Image (cartoon, rainbow, N blue to C red):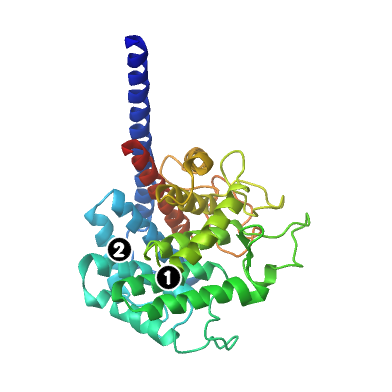
Amino acid sequence: MKRIVALWGALLLATTLTAQNTAQQVLSTTQKVNNYFMAKYADPTLPTNVKKVRPSNLWTRAVYYEGLMALNEIDPQERYLDYTDRWAAFHQWTPRNGIKTGDADDQCCEQTYMMRYVQTGKQEMLSPTLQNLDQQMQKANPKNQSLYGWWTWIDAIQMAMPAYMQAYKITGDKKYRDHAMQMYRWSRNECGGGLFNEKDGLWWRDADYVPPYKEPDGKDCYWSRGNGWVYAALVRCMNQLDKKDPAYKELKKDFLMMSKGLLACQREDGFWNPSLVSSNYAMTETSGTALFLYGMAWGIRNGLLKAKDYRGACDRAWAAMEKASVHSDGFLGWMQGTGKDPSDGQPLSYNRVPDFEDYGTGCFLLGATEYYKLLTKFKNS
């Protein structure tokens, strides 16, 4: 009997040490990836220059800062905040193209601005964002004349919807939550006849991809990173809402449908293809995989997903990215460049540098930090 107890004790100790080592390994890898980016792009105020010059508060860079703020939660460093504040202050805490923009891509940076406002209480970090959202809620999208018809592509749900929910949480004014939900429902149910397919739990990228559009093998075209944007947006919005809030319950329902649909699409090696259900462009891809890891790890940690069903998917996704994507210097391979469907940015490879490195790094940081939190939770539970 004593021997059995001793063996169980040794097994428990080994399991605990493995969890600790794994969590530390995840953190070390994540730091390496971020250090590579911060060293390469040391001046956060410089514009990007991919085919043309763009200011550094465009959506691609804004996604990186979402990831950096997530990393700061598990690895607090003043240099992360200084790097963020230099970037945001240079742009006067204002969305790209100014207060009057209604473009979700322009608004993505507002998520980080508001996170810094919550941490510091400095009004200049908040005021331009509220002015921007307030004016958007008063005007229709001139392209379709709908007050709620701004998010005509699913990427926009991640770029802008969490900002509305942050504004609601900060101010307590339900107008931000309610307007965001109306815009979300318009994209979900009306745009192109509805961009969300409840049957598969997956989203068509925009009205150009709803049926009868098909991939060459006759399957629907569900773009991996596009679905990743929505999946991440649901997480980021629910994080701002009380669990009893009707909006939380509505988004949770879609999150669960998406989780089931995405789980069915994961490859045996842990990655997801750029085209989720089609054999077209079947290959390793990092950005979508990172976003799915972000959502699934969060779902387990918050009790929405059962660990017995989803923990293995998270473990496989992390192991795949760490082994196949992360270079020794922190560069990320197999990253699809900007675009809107599986064919864009091809061919992908381990060594190819995508047109923009920033958003892919942000996706990776989001997935990695949430996975780290999951490992820590299981270690301590």
Q: SS for tag 1?
A: loop
Q: What residue is rendered at 50% in x and 66% in y?
A: 250
In the visual, does 104 lie left or right of 347? left
Q: To which quarter of the image does residue 210 belong?
A: bottom right
Say few, some or many: other residues with alpha carbon within 10 Å of mark 1 (under 14 / 14 to 19 / 20 or more): many
- Give above or below for 60 relative to 184: above
Using the image, determine if residue 286 lies above or below residue 337: above
Note whether residue 322 is visible: yes
Going from N to C along the chain, the mark reached first, 1 or 2, is: 2
Closer to the camera in the image, 267 or 147:
147
| Residue 311 in picture, x, y percent from top left | 48, 41
Is 206 drawn above or below residue 20 in the view shown? below
Which structural element holds mark 2?
A: helix
**Which residue matches tag 2?**
84
Q: Which residue is mark 1?
A: 108
Q: Is residue 309 left or right of residue 123?
A: right
**Residue appearing at x 41%, y 45% in the figure:** 371
